[in-house]
Amino acid sequence: MAMDAVAMMARSHVTAMAAAVLLCACALKTPPDAAQIRKEALPNTQIPEQWATQGALGASVEQGWLAEFQDAQLNTLAEEALAFNADLRVASARVDQAASYVKAAGAKLYPSVDLLARGGGKLSGDSSGLQGVGITASWELDVWGRVRAGRAATQAQYASATADFEYARQSLVAAVAKSWFTATEAKMQRAIAQDTVRSAEQLAGFARDRERVGRGDAFDVASAQASLETYRDTLRQLDLAYEQSVRALEVLLGRYPAALLQPPGQLPAMPPAVPVGLPSELLERRPDVIASERRVAAAFNRIQEAKAARLPRISLTAGVNTISSELFVLQERDNPMFSAGASLVAPLFQGGALQAQVELRTAEQRQAVAQYASVALGAFAEVESALASEFALRDREAILNRAVAESGRALGLVNVRYEVGSSDLRSVQQQQLASYAARASLLRVQSEARVQRVNVHLALGGGFGGPNAQLRDRMSVNMEDTASVVNIYRVVGAGAAEIRSPAGGWPSVVKIRLHGFRGLQSVQARASGHTLECKPKGNRFMSESYECNYTGGGESARVEGDYVEVELPRTLLTADGSPIEVQWSEHGL
């Protein structure tokens, strides 16, 4: 009873000390908001009310731009890239790292408890003769906000990594779309070059026929043959350009670059004009600008952390232990023994290291502000340049359409003249070259117009998703030994599927693996009145375990690498082969 009273008294003293100190704890300073950062970062920049490029539609920026091209194959390629692109997985891993830093920093706000046990016979394993067990607890009271500032910095860094990841997703889809248009253009340019070669072969044959009947000479034959070989060389160059453009696209998709992908033979129709919103809204919408803003906040909190590190640290400690010895007699004491106390560590002299840390963090904040200015000005420049390029390409396309029409008409006329002998071969060759050059230039402008439209969307920060995007998480099924594995790769973060039994019946084991999901909210599988539902336990940033309920019974899910694995209960795989409905979704971050 006496020991219980001592323990209760010690705990009450510790609680009282903690309460007294926490009442005096300093509140954290608030990082500068977006308006303050813009004022400091862009002192010489006057943001206009409208875009400087004339003709821009001022309506609000819309989401789901990928669907505007009405290309189902392009949607499929975007899904594949978002699931398997290597660079995007790097960005995803950075988000996971930042989430772990948040959890590690937050853990410092709580007490730490350690267990120490000693044993091993009379000499207790280390010849000391002592045996026993002890539990110690310590808690640093965050009086000056050092630990809280560190946690706030990691939270801002996590928000920055998340915004960077979203911008990487947008950039990847934009790169896939632009590569798709470029590969399509290369295929169409090759077709134009093939037409040119065929026409040059006919012209060379016609020149030889004229020489045989005495109406031409060797000069015309040599000139026609030289032009033919030049066109053949151009075709070979275009063959290589086409293969290289397809390989570049395949790398974006995470495939081996074998140049096997088949682009269509025509470019998609040009979507209608895109609303661009207001310049003042751009910095609040673009993910890369938001990421830079969060890095300023992280740097600000690091300064507060460094300043608080110059002040004393106060910690509370408590413990209970029992010690015995078979080797020698211990001095008379209570056993077990309870202890409680507090400690203060104040830095007196460290050679200026702590002040240097403050100066370092201050310089890092200035750097973050300067980087924000660079990203923000770059964003404005990208929008203006993309808009100006699109309007110029629109005008050029109209001009080149007229040029192609007139060149075709002129080529027909000069061919007739050459056939009746009123014109020479050189005139035909020149007009033929002009006609095909006009077609190639028009195609180049049409392809570039679509590329610039993608650049406009990316510069504006408009998302490729949205209600009409028609994107979905990728799913594939493969066998591993006797288990059937349903792999689901994150694209939009939510979806549903119906899994059907193969002809021979369900395999002995069916597993569902969700790759690349963060903050997974739930996974459900239903069949024949049975339901399995799995939800994360603990922190939603990156759960380390999942708890599953199966019509009243307990199950478990496994986290392995970047995926969460759920093994379906055997009774869910019904004998009648009924399909299993699977649904999954993740938390909004």
Image: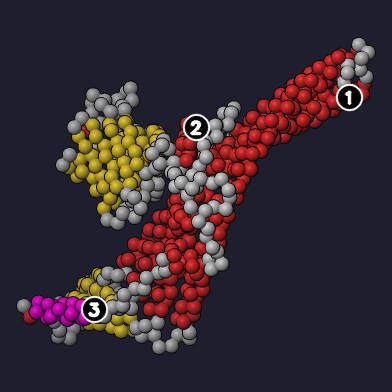
User: Residue 223, image x and y in percent?
Assistant: 87, 26
User: Residue 291, image x and y in percent?
Assistant: 46, 58
> Which residue is depicted at the point 23% across and 78% down?
23
Residue in front for this viewpoint, 372 or 579 = 372
The Cα atoms of the two marked residues, 1 and 2, are separated by: 46 Å
What quarter of the picture does the N terminus occupy? bottom left
Structural crowding at the residue carrying mark 3, measured as other residues with C-alpha within 10 Å and reported as few (<14), some (14–19) or many (≥20): few
- Tell me which amino acid carries mark 2: Asp
User: Residue 186, image x and y in percent?
Assistant: 64, 33
Report the span colored magenta: 4-21
Residue 94's place in the image compared with 181, above or below, is below
The Cα atoms of the two marked residues, 3 and 2, are separated by: 62 Å
| Side of 261 where 18 appears, left or right | left
Is residue 370 visible from the viewing direction of this image? Answer: no
Residue in front for this viewpoint, 154 or 562 = 154
Structural crowding at the residue carrying mark 1, measured as other residues with C-alpha within 10 Å and reported as few (<14), some (14–19) or many (≥20): some
- Kindly state the secondary structure of the residue where label 1 is placed: helix
Residue in front for this viewpoint, 43 or 370 = 43
Q: Is residue 14 magenta?
A: yes
The Cα atoms of the two marked residues, 3 and 1, are separated by: 98 Å
Label 1 near label 3: C-beta < 8 Å? no
Q: Name the residue under label 3.
A: 23
Give the quarter of the image for residue 30: bottom left
Q: Does the magenta stretch include residue 53?
A: no
Q: Residue furthest top?
A: 213
